[in-house]
Image (cartoon, rainbow, N blue to C red):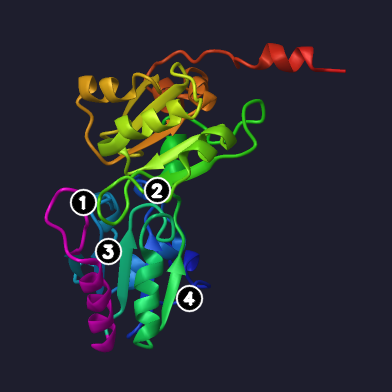
């Protein structure tokens, strides 16, 4: 790899921690800065959603530590993960904390950074492509489209206890957001769908599950809000998954570029006629 690409980028120094996002899965979606961190780190502490293809770029002699948190499975406590970063940095290690997606988008990066501040550990935030944007793009679903929406809401489907977040105003979301993107929501999709339906969303509104986004295991199931839970069960879907609700799902037959590379025939722009009629 051409080192000139990295020459002007900052170095990961001994005793420092980088909190970096690896993107939604495909190693090609990592930033140059995250890649440089992988090449320089003495220790890589990664979560469960980091693709093994990303970890392959780490130094051959680097210590690779798994610190993933997965719902319903034994997982390290967040405080223990944060303190492990402190311990490694105080030992003079160059530490890369690598997270799937972006560390500040439902990634608890803020909590870990605050612990580093508490212990006077120097750190850098290295943003990544969030799965709620990049993962959906790999499914051929844009989170915004001029003919559909000028706003999008990103939500988490469970809180720290594993329950549906009780502080979310589902009625306001249902009325005010034409497109809703849900992280970590498969377990509670039936409850969430009922909340949105009760607040006025249509049962036939398009909805898609995107599982293992931007990886070789990517699976996309298109359904409706009213049929979401049944479709998930029938397809035997497993997390991790993004869920997107809204008319943008209807663009997938035209924008499924991965499917097109495998031979799928893409449909014309479904809004072309509307655009033509709207011309002055």
Marks 4,3: beta carbons within 8 A: no
Q: Which residue is mark 2?
A: 28
Camera sees residue 73: yes
Whole-percent x, y for residue 214 in the image? 36, 39
Q: Earlier in the sequence, mark 1 or mark 3?
A: 3
Q: Nearer the viewer, mark 4 or mark 1?
A: 1
First in residue order: circle 1 vs circle 2: 2
Q: CA distance from mark 4 to mark 2?
A: 20 Å
Residue assigned mark 3: 58
SS for callout 4: loop
Q: Nearer the viewer, mark 1 or mark 2?
A: 1
- Marks 1,2: beta carbons within 8 A: no
Q: Give me the disc on residue 70.
A: 1
Farthest residue toward the right? 280
Give neighbour class at mark 3: few <14, some 14-19, many 20+ (Cα, 10 Å).
many
Q: Based on the picture, tell me whether residue 87 belongs to the magenta stretch.
A: yes
Q: Is residue 73 above or below residue 115?
A: above
- First of labels 4, 2 by sequence position: 4
């Amino acid at each position: 790899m051409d080192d000139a690409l990295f020459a002007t980028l900052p170095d990961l120094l001994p005793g420092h921690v980088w909190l970096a996002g690896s993107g939604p899965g495909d190693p090609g979606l990592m930033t140059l800065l995250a890649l440089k961190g992988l090449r320089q780190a003495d220790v890589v502490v990664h979560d469960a959603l980091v693709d093994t293809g990303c970890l392959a770029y780490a130094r051959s002699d680097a210590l690779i530590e798994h610190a993933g948190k997965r719902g319903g499975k034994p997982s390290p406590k967040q405080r223990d993960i944060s303190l492990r970063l402190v311990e490694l940095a105080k030992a003079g290690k160059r530490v890369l904390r690598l997270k799937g997606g972006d560390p500040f988008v439902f990634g608890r990066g803020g909590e870990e950074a605050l612990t580093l501040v508490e212990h006077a550990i120097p750190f850098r935030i290295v943003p990544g492509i969030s799965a709620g944007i990049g993962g959906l793009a790999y499914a051929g679903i844009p989170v915004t489209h001029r003919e559909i929406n000028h706003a999008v809401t990103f939500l988490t489907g469970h809180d720290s206890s594993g329950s549906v977040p009780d502080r979310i105003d589902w009625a306001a979301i249902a009325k005010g957001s034409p497109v809703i993107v849900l992280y970590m929501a498969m377990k509670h999709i039936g409850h969430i769908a009922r909340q949105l339906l009760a607040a006025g969303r249509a049962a036939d509104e398009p909805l898609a599950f995107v599982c293992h986004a931007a990886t070789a295991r990517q699976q996309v199931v298109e359904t409706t809000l009213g049929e979401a839970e049944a479709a998930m069960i029938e397809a035997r879907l497993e997390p991790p998954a993004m869920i997107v609700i809204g008319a943008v799902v209807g663009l997938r037959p035209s924008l499924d570029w991965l499917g097109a590379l495998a031979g799928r025939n893409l449909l014309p722009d479904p809004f072309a006629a509307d655009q033509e009629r709207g011309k002055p």
